[in-house]
Image (cartoon, rainbow, N blue to C red):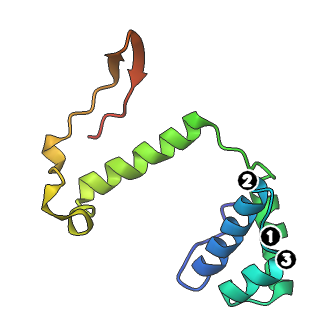
Amino acid sequence: NQTFVINSLNIHRLLITSIMVAAKFLDDFYYNNAYYAKVGGVSCHELNCLELDFLFMINFSLNVTPEVYDQYYRAIFCDEIRNQTLRPFCGPSIRSPAEYNFVEKNSRNGGDEQTLVCA
């Protein structure tokens, strides 16, 4: 949705809603909406509305394929390496961006493994 903007005023609502929806999708036993509303600091009515809006925004597509997950993981990881924002949290043991050698195709165990090139 192009009109939806994430900012400091709505990020907690997005997080609590997405966590609640993910728990309902993945777990057989989960807390009710009133519990998540209390934890998230919103009313139960508001969380019910947020849940419905969230599901329509993502077209009820709750399943993420491994390929899509990998694509976003690599994009975030490479962005973190480029900006060196991992360094303060990981300590001195993390390698510098120049030390990461990503190649597009890598042969491992007889199969092709694709990796992202961080440029």
Residue 114 image offset from top left, x and y in percent: 40, 25
As measured in the structure, the alpha-carbon distance from the residue carrying label 2 to the one carrying label 3 is: 19 Å
Amino acid type, label 3: Asn
Looking at the image, residue 107 sits to the left or right of residue 69; the answer is left
* 116, 18: nearer the viewer: 18
At 37% from the left and 30% from the top, the residue drawn is 115
Is the C-beta separation of discs 3 and 1 under 8 Å?
Answer: yes
Q: Say which amino acid is labelled 2.
A: Leu
Residue 6 position in % (x across, y down): 58, 73
Mark pair 3, 1: CA separation: 5 Å
Location of mark 3 (residue): 48
Label 1 to label 2: alpha-carbon separation: 16 Å
Mark positioned earlier in the residue sequence (1 or 2): 2
Nearest-to-viewer mark from 1 and 2: 2
**Residue 31 locus on image (x, y percent):** 78, 73
| Residue displayed at 58% across by 86% down | 9
Circles 2, 3 touching at the beta carbon (< 8 Å): no
Amino acid at pointer 1: Glu
Under circle 2, the secondary element is helix
Q: Identify residue for label 1.
A: 51
Give me the residue at 41% from left, 15% from top.
112
In the picture as drawn, the residue positioned furthest to the top comes out as 110
66 w.r.t. 28: above or below: above
Toward the front, the furthest residue is 29
Which comes before the other along the chain, label 2 or label 3? 2
Q: What secondary structure is marked by label 3?
A: helix
Callout 1 secondary element: helix
Q: Residue beneath label 2, please? A: 26
Tell me which residue sits at (84%, 68%) in the image. 52
